[in-house]
Image: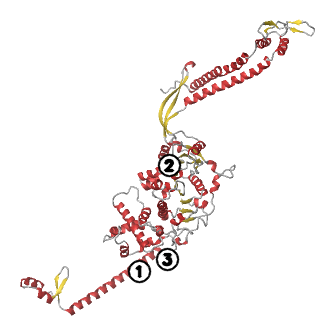
Amino acid sequence: MSDKLITDAGAGRAVFLTRVKLSLHAFSMAFWLGAFPGLLIPIVLWCSQLSPRDLDVVKLTVVSQVVNQDIPRKWVLRDVDGATKVLTVVKTDGNAVQLLTAPQFRIVASSISTAMRDATTAAWASLFVAFVGYLLVFSSLRRIGKSARENKRIDGAKDLVSPKALSRLVMKEEPGAYSLLDVALPRSAPMQGILLQGAQGTGKSLGMHDLMKQAFARKRKCIIYDPSGEYFRAHFRPGIDEFFNPALEGSVPWSIFAELEYEYDANTLAHAFLPPKGGVVHGASAFFEDAARALFSVILLRLAQRGAEHTHLIADAFLEMPDDEMDLLIKNSVASSAVGGDSKGQRQGVISSIAIYLDGISSVQPGTWSIRDFLDRDDDSRLFLLSTDDTEAMFTPLFRLLLTVAFGMIAAKQEIVHEDRYWFLLDEVAKIGDIKLDKVQAELRKYGVCVAAGIQSDKQLVTSMGQDRGETVLNCFNTVAMLRANEPNMAKRMASRLGEQDVAVVSKGQALAVTDWRDGGSLNQGEQNKWLVMPSKIGQMKNCTAYVRIPGDYPATFVDFRHWLPRWYRPFARVLRFKEAQSTPPRDPRFRVIRAAGQDAMASVREEADRVRAEAAKAEEEKKIADAERAASAKEKLERKGVWIVTDMETGEIVRADRTTTETSGGDKAGNKKNKGLW
């Protein structure tokens, strides 16, 4: 039916009257159960302590307030012994008076008893107790009603708590030295991985800055992957800290050969430099990847064994070494079968799989700096893997190599400490690629390795590592700060990480009728499974707000750290601690493009190609002349030494004529006839 049975005004009237009636019932109940008993109890207790005379004085005083004030009357009351007598007043002249007006009685009563003075106190006490009783009953009704109307958790994730409440729980059970967005972390949390996840511009970098400051204050060794230079400009200390980016002046001259201590280190570095691609398991692509890693590891090891020091020699070996020299270098190795032999196409395919990533290696400054030495130094120096947008593609494989070496060296030390010692702060960690974070978190935790990473979407890891590997890596981060996620599916996955609850859900109803006495409200309760935080709510979060989940059975919390940002009324905001202290180093002039002046680019290419072709033709002509001269010389030698017979036209086999005659028997006449005329 399109017609409304109940108008909006009618429904509003019914709802309003229902609320008023239910509220009046609550007020009435609060009065009769709270105020009225509170009003009577103090008076009854006070009266129970009065003597018979005092009790009569009080009653008659009350009566005197309502009777005619001008008519004298007798006032009967009991004495101390309980005997009933008429109040008699002896005047100064000796006459006894029993007829007294109401005002006169009150004057006489105040002189013979203090009960009325105590009555005032009892009355105020009665009113106070009545008021308190009313409030207690009314507040109890409100509390019961609120509890009855609220959904109650039965099982599943714990309800959200405030950041301060969560911090109190942590400090009570497992106090630690670090906090994430002002939420205290358990002592073991840094070694179990910290992840800041959310869209760009939501405040992940602020959380990473704050973690860095805490690690710096404890003088921990830190390796920082800085994809934009933000952390370098804020925290780099010239003369103390170091950074790596060969495209910038002042970069450490890293030697990949200095990182090799055992032969199997070459395999580890090859796997880090050329990590397996997600989803590539079988087929030609997998073969070329495996062969490229094998070839890289063999050449790296063989060059190191021959005394190589500078990293760029790896690139020289692949880009400039002739085939015969490379064959000699990889002889009797696992790579010789992959690139050896006559299959030139296969050889070029394997080498090309490596060569496309060699730009970064070829540009590393000559030197012997080693990350092993950096980690062995007993100081609080920091290493910044400083990336920029224009050098990211070139040097990301090298950043991956350095991190892999650092993890491997820490594992080789086998120094079990169970406290934070090394911090790896990796913002936009998906850009680095697969550095085996799952293995790092599982095995290096006991060596004091703490990994704090920033990521925009979990799908970034899935894309670079595959579905299973990506989920495994995400599972290794036990502490997560989840900021706004704009993509609905990502918001749903974040909500899943916060958890779900089995809840006793209360549904409310409103009964509306024509007659007021039939109007009413109803509450019904049932069980339901629901999100702790709705995915849509995660997509509507403000910048610098986050849900924080820490390891253990602690509840999650919602953090608002917008007070870190500067405002006119906050001149000392926390974000000011992260301001830039220096600028990014200048570019290395080695990478500057040198342009030829005064020539046509295409014409110069054609001229150079013509010159190369002419030189090749000249070399071919000289080769033909040399071959002809060698053939003539050989013929001359043959003619000088005697007559030769060609015995096989296909192979060109020849023998001397006199030797053939000697070895031929009578049964060889056919053969002699066959060779007749060949000399």
> Element type at marker 3?
loop
Q: Position of residue 535 (x, y in %)?
A: 50, 42
Q: Of 140 and 292, which appears nearest the observer? A: 140
Q: Residues within 10 Å of mark 1 (few under 14, many from 20)?
A: few
Q: Position of residue 213 (x, y in %)?
A: 60, 56
Label 3 belongs to which residue?
599
Q: Is residue 257 left or right of residue 210?
A: left
Label 2 belongs to which residue?
478
Instruction: Residue 676: tell me if it is visible.
Output: no
Name the kind of residue labelled 1 in the image: Arg
> Element type at marker 1?
helix
* 116 versus 660 height, above or below: above
> Element type at marker 2?
loop
Name the kind of residue labelled 2 in the image: Asn
* Res. 259 mark: none
**N-terminal-most mark, 3 or 2:** 2
Mark nearest the camera among 1 and 3 is 1
Question: Which residue corresponds to the image point at 73% horizontal and 17% vertical from the top-left?
Answer: 49
Name the kind of residue labelled 3 in the image: Gln
Question: Which residue corresponds to the image point at 44% horizontal and 51% vertical from the top-left?
Answer: 472
Question: Which residue corresponds to the image point at 6% horizontal and 85% vertical from the top-left?
Answer: 666
Q: Position of residue 166 (x, y in %)?
A: 57, 43
Question: Which residue corresponds to the image point at 52% horizontal and 55% vertical from the top-left?
Answer: 417
Label 1 belongs to which residue?
611
Q: Of 527 and 544, which appears nearest the observer? A: 527
Instruction: Residue 160: tell me if it is visible.
Output: yes
Q: Of 294 and 638, which appears nearest the observer? A: 294
Q: Position of residue 462 (x, y in %)?
A: 44, 53
